[in-house]
Image (cartoon, rainbow, N blue to C red):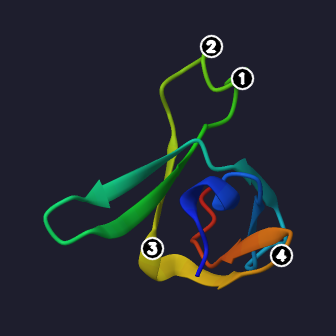
Amino acid sequence: MVKLSEMREKEVINIRNGAKIGYIYDFEIDLENGKVLALVLPGPGKVLSIFGKNNNYLIDWKDIVRIGTDAILVNIDVKD
């Protein structure tokens, strides 16, 4: 089992292009069923998850391929 606090320390990487997306900043949780629905990562241009545009990355739980010791691999569509 992986704790949410431990997941925040792992870098999120997209397996489609090998890009480092960043670190988890928050979670979307279904409180009624006790399930994590998505990962929230700061979008481009954010400094310390505070300053910048509010364009966060929302990665659905189903898009997580693997949670490793150092990284979380995701399979998400790359939009230009």
Which residue is the site of mark 3?
61
Tag 3 near tag 1, CB within 8 Å: no
**Which residue type carries mark 2?**
Phe
The CA distance from mark 2 to mark 3 is: 26 Å
Q: Earlier in the sequence, mark 2 or mark 4?
A: 2
Which residue is the site of mark 4?
69
- The tag on residue 48 is 1
**Which residue type carries mark 4?**
Thr
Where does residue 40 sit, x and y in percent of width and height?
50, 49
Q: Earlier in the sequence, mark 1 or mark 4?
A: 1
Badge 2: residue crowd in 10 Å (few <14, some 14–19, many ≥20)? few
**Which residue type carries mark 3?**
Trp
The residue sitting at 31% across, 57% down in the picture is 29
Badge 3: residue crowd in 10 Å (few <14, some 14–19, many ≥20)? some
Badge 4: residue crowd in 10 Å (few <14, some 14–19, many ≥20)? few
Q: Earlier in the sequence, mark 4 or mark 3?
A: 3
Tag 2 near tag 3, CB within 8 Å: no
The CA distance from mark 2 to mark 4 is: 29 Å
Tag 2 near tag 1, CB within 8 Å: yes
Which residue is the site of mark 2?
51
Q: Earlier in the sequence, mark 2 or mark 3?
A: 2
**Which residue type carries mark 1?**
Leu
The residue sitting at 13% across, 64% down in the picture is 32
Q: Quadrant of the C terminus?
A: bottom right
Q: Nearer the viewer, mark 1 or mark 4?
A: 4
Tag 1 near tag 4, CB within 8 Å: no
Q: Quadrant of the N terminus?
A: bottom right
